[in-house]
Image (cartoon, grey):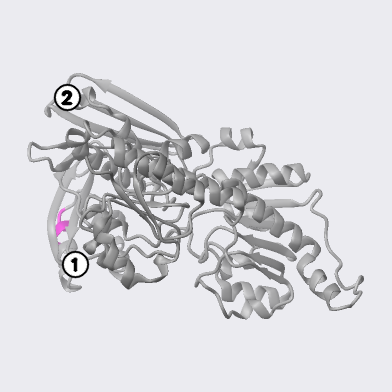
Amino acid sequence: MTAPKVLISDALSDTAVQIFKDRGIDVTFEPKLGKDKDKLAEMIAGFDGLAIRSATKVTDKLIGRADRLRVVGRAGIGVDNVDVKAATARGIIVMNTPFGNSITTAEHAISMMLSLARQIPQANASTHQGRWEKSRFMGVELFNKTLGIIGCGNIGAIVADRAQGLKMRVIAYDPFLSPERAQELGVEKVELEQLLARADFISLHTPLTDQTRNILSKASLAKTRPGVRIINCARGGLIDEAALADGLRSGHVAGAALDVFAQEPAEAHELFDMENVICTPHLGASTDEAQENVAVQVAEQMADYLLRGAITNAVNFPSISAEDAPRLTPWVRLAEQLGSFAGQLTDVPLKGVRIEYCGDVSKLNVKPMTAAALAGVMRPTLQNINMVSAGVIAKDRGIALEESLCDAGGIYESYVKLTVKTAEYNRSIAGTVFSDGRPRIIQVRDINMDFEVTSHMMFVRNCDKPGFIGSFGQLLGDHGVNIATFNLGREKPGGDAITVVALDEPITDEVLAKVTALPHVVRAKRLGF
């Protein structure tokens, strides 16, 4: 049997290279190849695995040349440089190492906060120039100050722990952070507006999603207390950089320490000219230990997959064995669709998720389905979440998980029912897999329905009154929106009703607002899958 072949196109440690060799894998180490896309495209066809960092761009075009490629391993958390959709369509597993650099990134945030408080980089530069400007660099203590953490997941929790060691008060805003988990971490869970109003320092530790983009906007920054200091070692785009510059110029924001920027590499920026700004070139994960950790992890994960079919930390597939894959795959896809559907309709913090497996599906390995459902529920807020990390992240945030197995499937031989639990309500959605292997949604909010999930959809909750369907369809038609499928369900005549439509393209904000304003509409939501 021919040994699997792996190409390493970015700089990985010698230890990682040796892991491949020791496991009997034919490895080619070309650490500068990622910067030569033409040469990489010429070579890729002969390899089963591709190990990368951030320099290599795994595009749709490159994937089209990769006839043998079975796995892409990213040494690090971000997979922005990988076309995951194209890889999935070709059956290529995309793996990352989501927890290998958490401590390093958290320590960098703490270092930035200390440097910001005492103006260390500026004082260092001045002293190197032969000046002795002792009175110029008057700093502030961290002791007894309030640190506001936006995003209290794995890295945010480590920052909170280190800040408490500095005797800071820590408050945190995170929709997924439960009161119980907050108490365990020793932080005070608050809403965003409370955090903005109270924090002396604000540190961001959330992924970049539609919900978190510009979370520190012009309006948000105006709500912060005068003299606030801001640290971002998470993702560029979380801060409106122009608004931040205005706040720094006015003095409302006393200082900022930034490791990430909306556009990278950031070779020119108005913030670079400001004395009260500290900048580093995305160094959050740049320590010897972190780079070694993620390199070793990705080598072990890729080797396990190529030699034994084991899948770990995949962003586009759950951890399942090769033997179970054919039967489980459609049910895993259904579970993720149920979770994504429910997650996009949940606008308040989760307290728990319950998943019921009824009928023949209950006899399968339900763990991958549960992981897929959890990832789907949380992905609208946590973009980088995957099916493997979903369970850990849910536990860290105190989201209670319940699984239930039952033999009887009712009308259907098998079905899966997912319920999201919040402090305000519980909402359920159910689905099944038909004999053709295609998932179907069969119930939403206890209202029977029957539809397939497609890329672009709209959910409408309305009162069951005459004229709604006509006015709704007319509105979409007037705006050139083509309906692919139209599905209706209702509680009872004249009661709550649900409309789910599949569309050929996503609707605009304008059309969504007009739908919401229609008579009898309670809620309208754009959904994407």
Main secondary structure along the magenta-highlighted residues? helix
Taking the image as shown, residue 268 lies to the left or right of residue 421, namely: right
Please indicate whether residue 11 sits to the left or right of residue 455 in the image.
right
Quarter of the view holding residue 56: bottom left
- Report x, y in % for residue 337: 26, 45
The answer to whether residue 98 is visible is no
Say whether disc 1 or disc 2 marks the residue closer to the N-terminus: 2
Instruction: Pinpoint residue 276: horizontal percent, then vertical percent.
Output: 73, 72
Do labels 1 and 2 touch, CB within 8 Å? no
Q: Which residue is mark 1?
A: 476
Q: Nearer the viewer, residue 115 or 519?
A: 115
Could you tell me the amino acid type at mark 1?
Answer: Leu
Number of numbered discs on residues: 2
Residue at 57 percent across and 70 percent down: it is 218
Q: Where, quadrant-wise, is the C terminus in this rendering?
A: bottom left
In the image, what residue occupies the spot 18% across and 55% down? 501
What is the x, y in percent for residue 178? Answer: 53, 37
* Magenta extent: 466-470
| Viewer-closest of 345 and 407 | 407
> Quarter of the image holding residue 456?
bottom left
Assess disc 1: are there few (<14), some (14-19) or many (≥20) residues with their C-alpha within 10 Å of its C-alpha: some
Q: Residues within 10 Å of mark 2 (few under 14, many from 20)?
A: some
On the image, the x and y values in percent for residue 132 come to 92, 74
Kindly identify the amino acid type of the residue bearing the numbered disc 2: Asp
Residue mark closest to the camera, 1 vs 2: 2
- Residue corresponding to mark 2: 360
Residue 47 is at least partly visible in this image: yes
Farthest residue to the left: give it: 436
| Point 89% across, 77% down: residue | 131
Label 2 SS? helix
Say which element carries label 1: helix
- Tell me the tag on residue 35: none
